Image (cartoon, grey):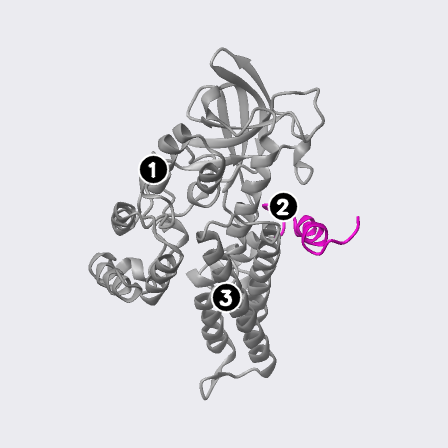
Amino acid sequence: MTLNAFRQDVRRWLEANCPASIRTPMPQDEMPGGGRRAQYKNPDTRVWLERMAEKGWTVPAWPTQYGGAGLDQDQSVVLQEELRRINARPALFGMGISMIGPALLEFGTLEQKVEHLPKIARGQIWWCQGYSEPNAGSDLASLKTSAVEHGDEYLINGSKIWTSGADHADWIFCLVRTDPKAPKHDGITFILFDIDQPGVTVKPILLISGMSPFCETFFDNARALKKNVVGEVNKGWTVAKRLLQYERTSIGGIGGSTQQAAKIEDIAKSYLGDTDGRIADDAARQQVIAHRMNDRSFGLTLRRSLEESQSGRAPGAASSMFKYYGTEQNIRKYELLLSIMGTQALGWGGSNFTADELTTTRAWLRTKANSIEGGTSEVQLNILAKRVLGLPD
C-alpha cells in the first residue's frame, strides 16, 4: 500500500469511528488513563479507547504481537497528522505507554513483554512509578527501599513519594535496593508488582492547586515475583536511567502545542481588546507572538524526535533538553496568561470568576511542579552540559 493510500484509509476510518465529542478540547476529568478501576465521565472516551486499541493505534509503532499496529516511521507520522487534522483527543494517556512500555520493549524478557505490553496497549492496567523517596529525590541512587529474597518472590519494605496516580494505579515499576553493601549506583533492582495487595498503603498529597495527583506509597512486606525483575538483579540503574529519558521526553511534550498557543491569542483579545483582528495591547501582542513562535519551533523539534524514536532510536541525553524546555515553556505560558488576565486569573472560587478562569488558576499553580518532576531543571541543565556539550565537571 502506498503512503497516500494509507492516508486515505486512515482518514476514512477516523471519520467513521472518532466520536464528535472526542474532537473537542479535553477536560482534565476526561483524560483516558484506563486501568482496572477506570470510570468514564464521557462514554465516548471508552468507545474511542476501545476502537483505537482494536486498531493497535494507541501504540501504533509497537509490534502487532504486543498490541501495536506495527506501523513504520512514515505511517506513524501520517496517523498523527490525520489525528491532528480532526483535533482528535489522544485515546490513551499514562506511564504505561510513555514510560514502562518502551522500557519493556528494550529491556524486558519475552515473557514480560507478552504479559504486560498488550494490557498496556488496551488500557487495562494503570501504572505508577516508584522512584523518589523522602531522602532520595534528585540524588535518586540514595534510595533505601529494600527487597529481600523470599522463595520465588521479593519482600519489599520502605516508602516512595511523589508516586503520581498511585491512588488509581494497578501496578508499579519500582526501584529497590537488593544489595545494601554495594556502591549506591549498584545494588539497585528494577522490578514490577501489583499494588492491590495488603502490603501496600497509598496516601494522596494535597497540592496548592487543589488536586492530589501525587502520593506517598508505603511498603510493608509487599510481594513482588522474581520473574518481574526487568534487566539484571543489582543492575536496575541502567533500566532506570533509560526510563527517565522516556519520561523526560514525555513531560517535555506539554510544551509545543500550536493549538494551545492559538488559544492564548483568543484569550488576550477577549481580555485586552481586539483591534482589526489583532490584540489591542502592543506589548501583550508581542509577547503572545514570541510565545507562539517558540511553541511552534519546539513542537517541530518534538515531532522530529518522535519520528526518530519510531525508527527504533531510543531517546538519549537530549531528552533532558525536551524536559527542560517543554516544562519551562509551559510555566511561561501560564505566567503570560496571568499577565493578560490579571486578577481574574487568581480566583479560587465564587461567582466573580468563570469556570475557565478558575481552571487557569489551578493550572498556573500546578506548573510550579513542572520544573521539579522528572528531574529538576537544574539537573537537566547539568546533564546537557556533561552529556551533550561535553563540558568539564
Q: What is the three-letter code of the residue carrying label 2?
A: Gly
Instruction: Name the residue: 32% across, 41% down.
Output: 67
Of residues 361 and 160, the one drawn nearer to the viewer in this rendering: 160
Relative placement, left or right, of 6 versus 260 is: left
- Which span of residues is magenta-colored? 371-393
**Placement of 121 over or under 285, stated as above or below:** above
Residue where numbered disc 2 is placed: 375
Q: Amino acid at mark 1?
A: Pro
Q: Is residue 374 magenta?
A: yes
| Distance from the alpha carbon under mark 3 to that under mark 2 | 23 Å
Q: State the residue at coordinates (56%, 46%).
A: 245
Q: Residue at x 38, y 45 (%)?
A: 62
Q: Residues within 10 Å of mark 3 (few under 14, many from 20)?
A: some
Residue 44 drawn at (x, y percent): 26, 51
Percent coordinates x, y for residue 198 in the rendering: 45, 19
Which residue is outermost to the top?
Answer: 151
Residue behind mark 1: 118
